[in-house]
Amino acid sequence: MSLFGALGAGVSGLSVQGEAMSVVSDNLANVNTVGFKRNRVLFEQLVTSSGLSGTNFNAGGVGADVLRAQGVQGSLNSTDRTTDLALSGNGFFVTVGSSTITGDTPKFFTRAGAFGEDNLGFLRHTSGTFLLGWRTDSDGTVQNIQSPEAVELQTVGSSARPTTQLDLGANLDSGALNSNFDTAIVPFAPLGVGVNIDQGIVLANLDAIVATPTSADFINSARLFDSQGDPHDISIAYTKRGENIWDYVMFADGANIVNQTAGVNVRIGSGTVEFNANGTIKNQVVRSPDGTINPTGELPILWSGGVEAGLIDLNLGDLTGGLVFDESDLDTSGLFLNESIAAVTIDSAKGLLAGTDPTQPYQLHSDGLGGLFVVNDPLAASGGPFTSATIVIPSPLLLPQTFEFDNGLSITLDDGFATGPAGQIGLNVTAVNVVPEGTGVGSNGIVQFASPFNTRFVNQDGFGSGTLSNVTVDEEGFVVGAFTNGETKRLFKLVVAVFQDPVGLDPVSGNLFRQTDKSGEPLFKEAGIGNTATVVSGALEQSTVDIATEFSSMIVTQRAFSASSKIISTVDQMLAELLSLR
C-alpha cells in the first residue's frame, strides 16, 4: 500500500536529515581546525520497483552521500613559527608513524602543516607523526629519490670549509704620490727560480711596509679559514709604484703561519695591479712569498696548526687585458730598480695615435744632456724606428715621478735617478698581450679613481664550524638550515603526495587521512613542479567552513527534519482512520 511507502519515505527523511545535521555540526565544530575541508551532504532520490512500473506510485524516500571537498584551497594565515607550513595548490604533506621507516610503516596525509621539532630533532605533526622528506646535498640535490625519510635536524651539522676564493673590491686614489723605493736595501732572499734580484728589492721594500703597515697608502683586511675552520686574519696593503701601477702585499701575524714568530707580521703573498687610463683594472700579477709569479692567480699559504695548506684564488676583478710589460723581462733587460726605474707602462691607444707599433720593442735612451727619449721598433720591423720627443729630467730628482712620452710609454723614476752619458739604458723591452678575464669590464673589483681610498667589498667563501640556529622552508619544499657561522644550506626536500581522487581519502583523527582503493596510490612529487602545490613557510591553511553558510544549512535541515516527522504523524492518522472502518 502507498501509505506504507509514504511512511518509509518519512523515516528515510528523518534519518538523512539527521545525518545532514551531523555534517553541519561537524563543520561548525571544526571552523577553526587547521586544514579542515568543509563537508557537504548530497541528497539522492530512492526509487522503489513499483514506482518504476509507472502504474502504482510508491514513495522510495531519500538517501544521502557525504562529499569531503579535499580539492578546495583554504585561505593562508601567517604565523610566527617557520615550521608552520601550508600548501598552496594540489597535494598533501606526508607523515609517517615511526621515525624508522620500513615497508610496514603507516603513511598519513595532511593539509594541516603545524609541525614542530621534538627533543630528538625530528619535525613532528601535532598528531605525533613524523614529517617525510628526501635528504639533500647542500646544493639541493636529492641524495636518494627512492628513500624518503623522517626530517631530522639534531644531527645536521655544518662542517668547516677552507677559504679558496678571496674577492676584493676597493678604490685606490689615483692622486696618491708615487712610492719611494729604497734601492740600497738588502734584497729579500731566497728568491724563487728565475726571479731577478730587482724583484728581491721590491719584496724587501714590501717587507718594510709589512713591518710598519702605517707606511702603506691604503690597507684593508679579510678573515680567512683553514681546513679545520680556524679563522686567520690577514691584511692587504697597497702602495703606488707609478702612474696606473700599484704593488700590494698580503700579511698576517706569524702565529698563523708555519715556523713563524707570533706577534711579528709575515708576508704571505704580494703582487701588482696595473690600470687603464680610465681607472679600470688592466692586469693583475700574484706572487708567492719567494717572488715567483703564480699564473693561475692562486696564492699558497702554509697555515699553522697542523692543517692543510691553503690555496687562495685572489680575485681583484675581471681584467680588461691589453699590452703590458712583463716584470721578469724588465729584470732581465736591466731596465728596472738597478737603474732607479720603478715602473714601465704603456698606453697602447696613445701609441697607435702617435703612429707607433706598441707590439714592437722599445729602447730607453739618454741624450747625455739630462734628457730621456724612447725609440720604438728600432729594427724597423713595422715601419720604424719611431723616436719620441726628449723629456728633460729634473736634477736632482727629489721625489719618485712618472714621465709620459708622446709614443704612449710611461716611465716612473725613483728619487736620485741620473740620466748619465748618452746611449741606451738597459736592453730592449717588449710588451706582451694579456687576454681579458671574466667579463673584461675591469670595474667590478679594484679600481683607480680620483676619489678617497675606500673598501667596496671583501668576500671569501670559507667558514668555520657552526651549529644549526634556525630552519626555514622555501616554496620548493627545501628545508633550509641557517648556522651560527653564517652558512645556510639545504638539508631536506619535503615530499608532496598527489592523489588521483583525493575525495576518496579516509579521514582519521589528528587532521590526517589514509589512502583507500577509491583514492588510489599516492604519487610522491616535488613541490612546485607540474600541478603540485608550493610550500608556504610561516603560515597555516585555514578551515574552509563558512559559519553563515552552515547556519543556513542548519535551518533548512531542521525544517526538512520537521517535515519528515510530519509525514510520519500524518500517515499514522490515515492508518488509524483505515483501522476504524467497519
Image (cartoon, helix red, strand yellow):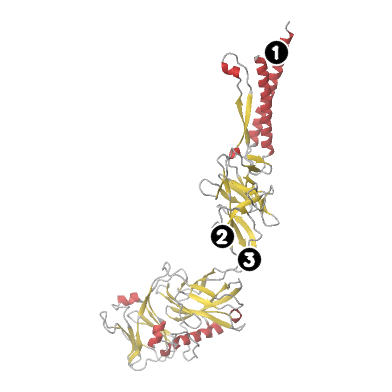
Q: Separation of disc 3 and disc 1 at Cα?
A: 85 Å
186 left or right of 131 in image: left
Q: Residues within 10 Å of mark 1 (few under 14, many from 20)?
A: few
287 sits to left or right of 411: right
Q: Residue furthest front?
A: 103
Q: Which mark is residue 547?
A: none
Amino acid type of the residue that numbered disc 1 sits on in the rendered structure: Met
Q: Which of the two residues, 194 or 475, is positioned nearer the viewer here?
A: 194
Q: Answer few, some or many: residues within 10 Å of disc 3's Cα (few below 14, many 20 plus, some between 14 and 19).
A: some
| Mark earlier in primary sequence (2, 3) | 2
Assess disc 2: are there few (<14), some (14-19) or many (≥20) residues with their C-alpha within 10 Å of its C-alpha.
Answer: few
Identify whether 47 is placed above or below 315. above
Q: Quadrant of residue 29 in the image?
A: top right
Provide residue 27's location: percent of width, then percent of height.
Answer: 66, 36
Give the residue type that dot 2 points to.
Answer: Asp
What residue is pinned by disc 2? 137
Q: Is residue 20 above or below residue 95?
A: above
Looking at the rendered structure, the secondary structure element under dot 3 is: loop
Q: CA distance from mark 2 to mark 1?
A: 79 Å
Give the Cα distance between marks 2 and 3.
17 Å
- As drawn, the label of residue 466 is 3
Nearest to N terminus: mark 3 or mark 1: 3
Location of mark 1 (residue): 574
The local secondary structure at tag 2 comes to loop
> For the residues carrying marks 2 and 1, which lies nearer the camera in this image?
2
Closer to the eye: label 2 or 3: 2
Q: Earlier in the sequence, mark 2 or mark 1?
A: 2
